[in-house]
Image (tube, helix red, strand yellow):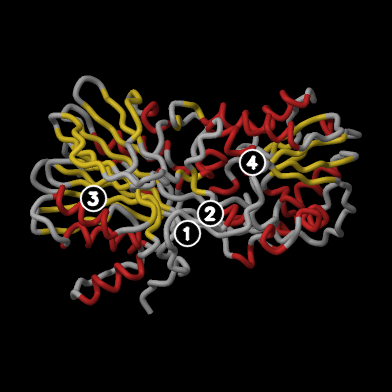
Amino acid sequence: MVCRSAPMGAILYMLQDHDDKPAHECGVFGIVATDADVARLTFFGLYALQHRGQESAGIAVANGRTIRSHKAMGLVSQVFNEENLRPLTGHLAIGHTRYSTTGSSRLENAQPFVVESVLGPLAVGHNGNLTNAATLRQELLTRGVGLTGSSDSEVITQMLAGGEGRTWEEKFKVFMVRAQGAYCLTVLTRDALFAVRDPLGLHPMCLGRLGERGWVVASESCALGTIGASFEREIEPGEILMITTEGPRTIAHMPAHKPAECLFEYIYFARPDSLLHGKALHAVRVAQGRELAREAPAEADVVIPVPDSATPAAIGYAQASGLPYSEGLIKNRYIGRTFIQPDDQLRQVGIALKFNALTDNLAGKRVVMIDDSIVRGNTSGPIVRLLREAGASEVHVRVSSPPIRHPCFLGVDMATYPELIAHRLTIPQICEHLGADSLAYLSLEGLINASRHGDDTFCRGCFTGKYPVDIELVNKEIFELR
């Protein structure tokens, strides 16, 4: 299939949409260590999880009697300093870095949430999204529970603080029966850390060991190595893990009949050095690229990735196709970190704010451009144009995931139906829109086979529209206080 180039006008490129990717979720972290500065270690753990959320960050620390916390809007490095870390003393801590999926980006929704309960102080950090949050929120309001924010994470906190049960174990069980959707929780009481993963196991969570007596939980294993902890195991779907100074203990296990892990953790979200099911994601993504090369070969001279997330898939595509791998785009890794918006002149520059092309590697070449996903389609076209302007004679786009035709309601900001280009257009129409010579996606079967060798225990809602739980169709700001 050959597509004619579409006319390219001015590129109105906004920094907040610079990657045209599913937006990150949240990162959670927890630690129990009697002989360490747990707040400082949590800071560095969150630093390793910064890719999962860049809107706000927070840390709560318990000392056996009380819980102290600090949180603010911004990146981890902007929120914390020596002055506000110093008062956070104790031997148990949780941390959170947020991207909003339910509830807008404002301080009232930053985490961890800290409240008093009949069983003592409580702090909660949450990654995921409850699909029945509207129902649960209304139940709380009917009972007279006051809510200050607009996130489902505050709903979770209040359900735990004021829910049925005489012990934390009983409260967790009641919550897990009532809640639907995705949640990985780090919960801090005055003398214990709890790690809770939803029965479907939609998003990852793991346990690590720190020295002789320290224990760590985190959204991804990459955070363990950052603080010198070793990977022990994954938190199981439906598991409630309690960690004290005596060590970890599973107090309940409530798994679903069939897990439904998020496929986008394997495609894009989790860091390539993180482990899922005992395998580094870099190797999984290389395998996805190999499968893509087998399904969608191209007559070309060179394979290049859209950096950085598509690099492993491009390596795999080059290996399986026999084509040389090269860099064709250099990414400015810090432009997305600024809060200063570009002026009109810089907006006309467009994609050059994010990437520079390596002309010597592209001139006169037939290029296979590998990307891991296309959501809205608002940056892939400008990248194709950039490659052509740098001298590429042909640009063949290959995507190491299937077309995204449906939104996600389980903890990923995947855009809405009108925004999803694969929902509105056919693949030939997308190809024409991008101005590419050809376009092909990895099949769902190929993705599953490359990711888990045929072990199909994945949520595939964004590809098929079939979700593992019932969905209440609401937008993420549905609970905003007017």
Distance of mark 1 from mark 2, alpha carbons?
Answer: 9 Å
Q: Which residue is mark 4?
A: 332
Callouts 1 and 2 close, C-beta under 8 Å: yes
Distance of mark 3 from mark 1, alpha carbons?
Answer: 30 Å
Q: Residue at x 17, y 59 (%)?
A: 161
Distance of mark 4 from mark 1, alpha carbons?
Answer: 31 Å
Of residues 188 and 412, the one nearer the viewer is 412
Q: Residue at x 34, y 37 (%)?
A: 218
What numbered label is drawn on residue 461? 2
Is 203 rendered above or below residue 120?
above
Q: Which residue is mark 3?
A: 69
Residue 268, position as x, y percentages in the image = 56, 41
Q: Quadrant of the C terminus?
A: bottom left
Q: Is residue 122 visible?
A: yes
Which of the two labelled residues, at mark 3 and mark 4, occupies the earlier sequence position? Answer: 3
Q: Which residue is mark 1?
A: 409
Distance of mark 3 from mark 2, alpha carbons?
Answer: 36 Å
